[in-house]
């Protein structure tokens, strides 16, 4: 006789319950683990004989799992495996009956090492990833938190990777979490450590700027302003909103407000929607970029007054976060959200799976039929993607409009890190030469050329000549001549984006009758911008590089060719290195306001 014991695979039973359940289970026969019917429950079937260790049971329950979770919970979740493909479409198991969906619409498998699913579209109609239509018969990758729609605006599934094992102290539901917290507080024990985001920022309260009795706080020398309404209580569920273009629009109809009072609620359903969310346990939060404060276009008292008046009109308690400049708090960076989670939500841990963000900067293209201009940027959507938050445009949230396509940024950091990139495409090629030579580097700021020179050439007796050190190209040419004259290998670490600048060094090599190779960084312009943003966040020693410099290089760039006098042209790929996992976590975020 067998005893069947069931557990919800999405919310595992706590360890204490499991051990009590399995006190009399035998270890001397086969144990089977599988799925029970179509209910989505796990099933463990074991004969009742003698005792087995609790450790054995827990080992059987340890499992990596990948799921496509129905965003609106209208369809069963779909488990995805690594060793074989799962077909997603119009099937009895998926409960999708729409004839626009093919029976085998998607072919999907999981990559647990990279925490992504790899899928192809086999169906007649297109599918979307985070709102972007995808090409058929081509491999696509979706990472944890990404949303795949089987057909545009229908049947959204969120990619979900579970932890490898059941934690002893993991409560199975909200009631048990509250009981557990209460028990531990009464016993005087510390709560289990909360898993925070790997990339952390330093947040410092500006004590000198805090007026007594004010609901406003200032952080990091005014880079972040925070307003907290009376009766605004912590919650694990956060309903977060952008402000301009989302909650409000200008009364005058102009793009930018003409005064502090030039605003009105953007939709007639704003107040009723927020009140409904608040009554359902959501904490209402505003996350707004206001760079005009730093540039001097907006005065701090004016923005404070405006936000207070807006919150009064909303009719619910709200906590507002205002990023005043171009720093770690500005969207799409996650500084405002992290400050909320780490410092401004009491001792309540925010549950991102139950939270959401609404914003109008969603990367939507122009819609001539609807007479709508393209979005000014995609920072709201990208911040939500960085945080794995469910995202809505204002129209989707307040007007229940169908989901719209959007234009994905040219550079996707997660996708880049998921690919295996070799430094040199030809692995047999030797980077450094044993003979005397001159190397001319070609690459704009942020392409990784200086790091490449230091890591792969400086240690092989190459002298690095750089305009950043010497000050002018004339001094660089003089130093190259000196090196070649004294039989020293040399590499020119300048941008060298046009033929004229490269010719100066090719002529020097001809003068001394030594070969001259050209090493070209393959890093795209948008990738380079991402690298620059990352460097400015992680290394304060580097000075900021203006857009003017980047655009000038891009405008004047000419692809090098051997007819310029080079003996060889070598293409070098950018391969990042990180000090720790925190840096890697930051790098894979969208950092640019594209």
Image (spheres, helix red, strand yellow):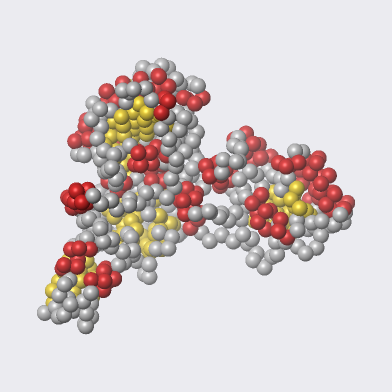
Residue 15 falls in image quadrant = bottom left
Q: Residue at x 32, y 26 (%)?
A: 215
- Picture coordinates of residue 138, whole percent (x, y): 46, 59
Q: Is residue 431 left or right of residue 239?
A: right
Residue 571 falls in image quadrant = bottom right
Up/down of 319 relative to 180, above or below: above
- Picture coordinates of residue 2, whole percent (x, y): 13, 77
* Image quadrant in which the N terminus is located: bottom left
Residue 122 falls in image quadrant = bottom left
Q: How many tags in the picture?
A: 0
Q: Nearer the viewer, residue 12 or 189?
A: 189
Q: Residue at x 47, y 48 (%)?
A: 586
Q: Is residue 133 left or right of residue 233?
A: right
Residue extending furthest toward the bottom: 28
- Picture coordinates of residue 53, whole percent (x, y): 23, 74
Residue extending furthest toward the left: 1
For residue 103, say whether it is visible: no
Up/down of 185 relative to 91, above or below: above
- Picture coordinates of residue 41, whole percent (x, y): 20, 64
Q: Residue at x 71, y 50 (%)?
A: 441
Q: Residue at x 67, y 68 (%)?
A: 428
């Amino acid at each position: 006789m067998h005893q069947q014991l069931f557990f919800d695979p999405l919310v595992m039973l706590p360890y204490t319950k499991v051990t009590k359940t399995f006190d009399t289970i035998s270890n001397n026969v086969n144990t089977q683990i599988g799925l029970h019917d179509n209910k989505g429950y796990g099933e463990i079937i074991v004969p009742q004989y003698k005792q087995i260790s609790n450790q054995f049971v827990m080992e059987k329950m340890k499992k990596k799992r990948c799921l496509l979770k129905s965003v609106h919970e209208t369809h069963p979740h779909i488990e995805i495996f690594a060793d074989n493909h799962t077909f997603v479409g119009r099937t009895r198991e998926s409960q999708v009956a729409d004839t626009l969906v093919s029976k085998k619409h998607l072919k999907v498998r999981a990559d647990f090492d990279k925490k992504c699913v790899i899928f192809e579209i086999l169906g007649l109609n297109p599918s979307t990833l985070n709102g972007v239509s995808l090409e058929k018969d081509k491999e696509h990758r979706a990472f944890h938190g990404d949303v795949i729609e089987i057909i545009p605006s229908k049947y959204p599934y969120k990619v979900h990777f579970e932890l490898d094992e059941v934690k002893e102290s993991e409560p199975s539901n909200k009631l048990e979490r509250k009981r557990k917290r209460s028990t531990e507080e009464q016993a005087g024990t510390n709560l289990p450590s909360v898993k925070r985001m790997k990339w952390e920022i330093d947040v410092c309260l500006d004590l000198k700027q805090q007026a007594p009795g004010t609901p406003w706080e200032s952080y990091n020398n005014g880079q972040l302003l925070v307003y907290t309404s009376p009766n605004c209580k912590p919650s694990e569920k956060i309903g977060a909103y952008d402000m301009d273009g989302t909650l409000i629009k200008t009364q005058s109809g102009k793009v930018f407000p003409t005064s502090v009072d030039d605003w009105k609620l953007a939709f007639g359903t704003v107040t009723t929607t927020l009140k409904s969310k608040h009554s359902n346990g959501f904490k209402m939060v505003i996350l707004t970029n206001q760079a005009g404060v730093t540039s001097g276009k907006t005065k701090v008292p004016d923005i404070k007054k405006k936000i207070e008046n807006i919150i009064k009109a909303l009719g619910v308690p709200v906590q507002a976060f205002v990023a005043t400049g171009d720093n770690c708090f500005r969207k799409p960076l996650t500084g405002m959200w992290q400050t909320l989670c780490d410092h401004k939500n009491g001792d309540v841990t925010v549950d991102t799976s139950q939270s959401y963000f609404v914003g109008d900067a969603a990367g939507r293209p122009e819609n001539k039929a609807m007479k709508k201009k393209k979005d000014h940027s995609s920072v709201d959507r990208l911040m939500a993607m960085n945080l794995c938050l469910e995202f809505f445009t204002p129209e989707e949230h307040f007007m229940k409009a169908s989901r719209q396509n959007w234009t994905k940024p040219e550079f996707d950091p997660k996708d880049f890190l998921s690919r295996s990139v070799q430094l040199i495409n030809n692995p047999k090629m030797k980077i450094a030469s044993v003979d005397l030579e001159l190397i001319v580097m070609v690459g704009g700021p942020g392409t990784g050329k200086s790091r490449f020179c230091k890591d792969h050439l400086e240690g092989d007796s190459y002298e690095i000549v750089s305009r950043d050190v010497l000050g002018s190209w004339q001094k660089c040419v003089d130093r190259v001549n000196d090196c070649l004259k004294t039989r020293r290998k040399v590499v020119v670490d300048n941008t060298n984006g046009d033929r004229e600048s490269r010719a100066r060094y090719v002529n020097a090599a001809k003068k001394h009758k030594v070969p001259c190779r050209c090493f070209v960084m393959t890093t795209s312009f948008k990738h380079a911008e991402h690298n620059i943003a990352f460097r400015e966040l992680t290394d304060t020693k580097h000075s900021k590089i203006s857009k003017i410099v980047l655009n000038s290089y891009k405008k004047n760039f000419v692809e090098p060719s051997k007819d310029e006098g080079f003996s060889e042209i070598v293409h070098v790929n950018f391969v990042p290195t990180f000090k720790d996992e925190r840096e890697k976590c930051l790098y894979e975020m969208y950092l640019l306001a594209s």
